[in-house]
């Protein structure tokens, strides 16, 4: 998975700086993560995994799934479409599937997602995408 | 011990033979007696090509299935090990895959795992480091590249045969076949479905799977199970998410009455009828019988439904004399409480 495909090419020099200077990345993260966090939590009940898939899933945060499944839904969805673990919550994957029909990027909904890189949890997904971190081959063992 | 050549890869050979393949599930032991596993295996071994052992089903702790599978391998049965993402992170899962291979286990069914909220220890921390699709991907990565996820070489590389589950009876119904496609793309080599009670829904699912061409890429085994009682049926309907038991079947079980013999016969009859109906659906490569702690039913079902394993079973090992217990240098009683 390479998230850089959604990043404008003009940001590439900036991404290079982020990759080359971890200190710069860290400082920028410290400044940016709280803003990104509060905005995304308010709008999409984001969990700040740092490897955002909102744009691929109809702007539904999949990390709200109690099993944190990134290639869901699991086989335990109730007949009424609710979660097997939290019976009062609608399955996030059902919600994502419904919403992805409205938002652009439906074609992205069906693709395979690499497991999460837990080192990036809590960091700014935007900076990570610009730097190309989630697609880090070492982290996920995948190209 | 049975020579490894006779059972190793038997399941894959059976799937390649083109004949209908039969697998079944035995309960993983709830204690420490290896004879218990052998007893259950003996009940089913002549009727199936491979035997599944589940991993802490329903979030309730049992013995690790890897041990039960190792015993099955000693008995000359090709085991299918269930591996779930609930209890182990990606490092533990990789090392368990290698451990399975060391014991002669190569078939691995990759699952997300029942959440512990349904079990008897709901206070446990859920792991879910990766999901089932990533687990399939991991198993096929280990086998095809001969390296760990880090890229470090495994010498000699493992030989795994990863499979996956399918849940045609959980919403969103129209997305389920697509998700199965995702699993096949990740490297699943066989599919075992959730228990089919609602054949109409399953037919719809298989039609869509056929449209996507998945049944020609991987063999799909339909899950079937005998219903033992009205209580069991209502429990499966109400308490087990992702399972659909039509009221029609529950009424039939009620009509069979309380007599144990009668209701068990009715449960098996229902199962056989379902098998007959599934046989007519194109794209089904065989059956996976889940007797749910009722292993003796497998023989009856396969006789009544005329199910035959695709491959001939290797001979069971001769009854070896039971080895004498190993004498400990010190008895447990002589140790101090700390040492003990």
Image (cartoon, coloured by chain):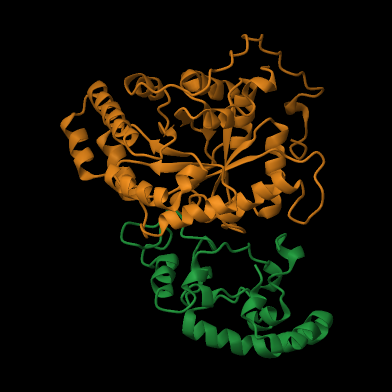
Residue B29 visible in the current orientation? no
Q: Is residue B151 left or right of residue B277?
A: right
Residue A38 visible in the current orientation? yes
Q: Quadrant of the C terminus of chain B?
A: top right
Task: Choose between B261 and B211: the one closer to the eye.
Answer: B211
Residue B222: quarter of image: top left
Q: Which residue shows up at 46% across the image and 28% down it?
A: B22
Q: Position of residue B90 (x, y in %)?
A: 67, 54
Residue A97: quarter of image: bottom left
Image height of B197 relative to A20, above or below: above
Image height of B164 relative to B308, above or below: below
Q: Is residue B102 left or right of residue B295?
A: right
Image height of B289 relative to A119, above or below: above
What colour do you see for chain B?
A: orange
Q: Position of residue A105 (x, y in %)?
A: 49, 75
Q: Quadrant of the N terminus of chain B?
A: top right
Image height of B169 relative to B261, above or below: below
Residue B104: quarter of image: top right
Taking the view exactly as shown, the residue that stands out farthest to the left is B255
Q: Position of residue B235 (x, y in %)?
A: 32, 44
What colour do you see for chain A?
A: green
Q: How many marks?
A: 0
Q: Position of residue B314 (x, y in %)?
A: 59, 16
């Amino acid at each position: 998975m390479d998230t850089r495909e959604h990043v404008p090419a003009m940001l590439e020099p900036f991404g290079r700086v982020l990759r080359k200077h971890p200190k710069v990345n860290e400082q920028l993260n410290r400044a940016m993560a709280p803003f990104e966090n509060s905005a995304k939590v308010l709008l999409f009940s984001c969990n700040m995994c740092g490897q955002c898939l909102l744009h691929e899933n109809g702007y539904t945060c999949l990390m709200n799934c109690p099993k944190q499944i990134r290639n869901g839904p699991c086989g335990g969805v109730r007949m009424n479409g609710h979660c097997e673990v939290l019976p009062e919550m609608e399955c996030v994957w059902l919600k994502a599937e419904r919403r992805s029909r409205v938002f652009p990027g439906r074609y992205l909904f069906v693709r395979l997602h690499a497991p999460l890189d837990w080192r990036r949890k809590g960091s700014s997904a935007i900076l990570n995408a610009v730097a190309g971190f989630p697609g880090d081959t070492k982290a996920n063992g995948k190209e | 011990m049975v020579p490894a050549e006779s059972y190793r890869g038997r399941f894959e050979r059976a799937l390649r033979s083109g004949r209908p393949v039969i697998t079944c599930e035995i309960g993983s032991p709830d204690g420490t007696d290896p004879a218990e596993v052998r007893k259950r295996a003996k009940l089913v071994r002549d009727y199936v090509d491979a035997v599944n052992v589940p991993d802490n089903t329903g979030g309730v702790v049992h013995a690790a299935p890897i041990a039960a599978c190792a015993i099955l391998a000693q008995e000359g049965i090709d085991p299918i090990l269930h591996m779930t993402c609930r209890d182990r992170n990606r490092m533990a899962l990789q090392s368990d895959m290698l451990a399975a291979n060391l014991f002669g286990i190569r078939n691995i069914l990759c699952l997300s795992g029942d959440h512990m909220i349904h079990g008897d220890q709901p206070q446990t921390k859920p792991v879910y480091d990766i999901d089932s699709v990533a687990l399939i991907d991991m198993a096929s990565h280990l086998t095809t590249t001969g390296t760990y996820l880090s890229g470090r070489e495994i010498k000699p590389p493992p030989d795994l045969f990863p499979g996956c589950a399918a849940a045609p009876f959980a919403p969103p119904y129209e997305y389920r076949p697509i998700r199965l496609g995702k699993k096949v793309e990740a490297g699943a080599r066989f599919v075992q479905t959730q228990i089919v009670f609602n054949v109409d829904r399953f037919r719809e699912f298989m039609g869509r799977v056929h449209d996507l061409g998945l049944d020609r890429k991987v063999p799909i085994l339909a899950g079937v199970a005998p219903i033992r009682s009205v209580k069991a049926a209502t429990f499966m309907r109400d308490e087990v998410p992702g399972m659909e038991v039509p009221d029609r079947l529950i009424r039939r079980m009620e009509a069979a009455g309380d007599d144990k013999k009668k209701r068990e016969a009715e449960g098996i009859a229902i199962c056989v009828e379902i098998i007959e109906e599934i046989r007519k659906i194109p794209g089904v490569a065989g059956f996976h019988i889940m007797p749910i702690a009722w292993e003796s039913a497998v023989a009856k079902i396969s006789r009544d439904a005329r199910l035959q394993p695709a491959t001939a079973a290797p001979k069971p090992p001769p009854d070896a004399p039971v080895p004498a217990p190993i004498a400990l240098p010190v008895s447990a009683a002589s140790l101090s409480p700390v040492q003990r």
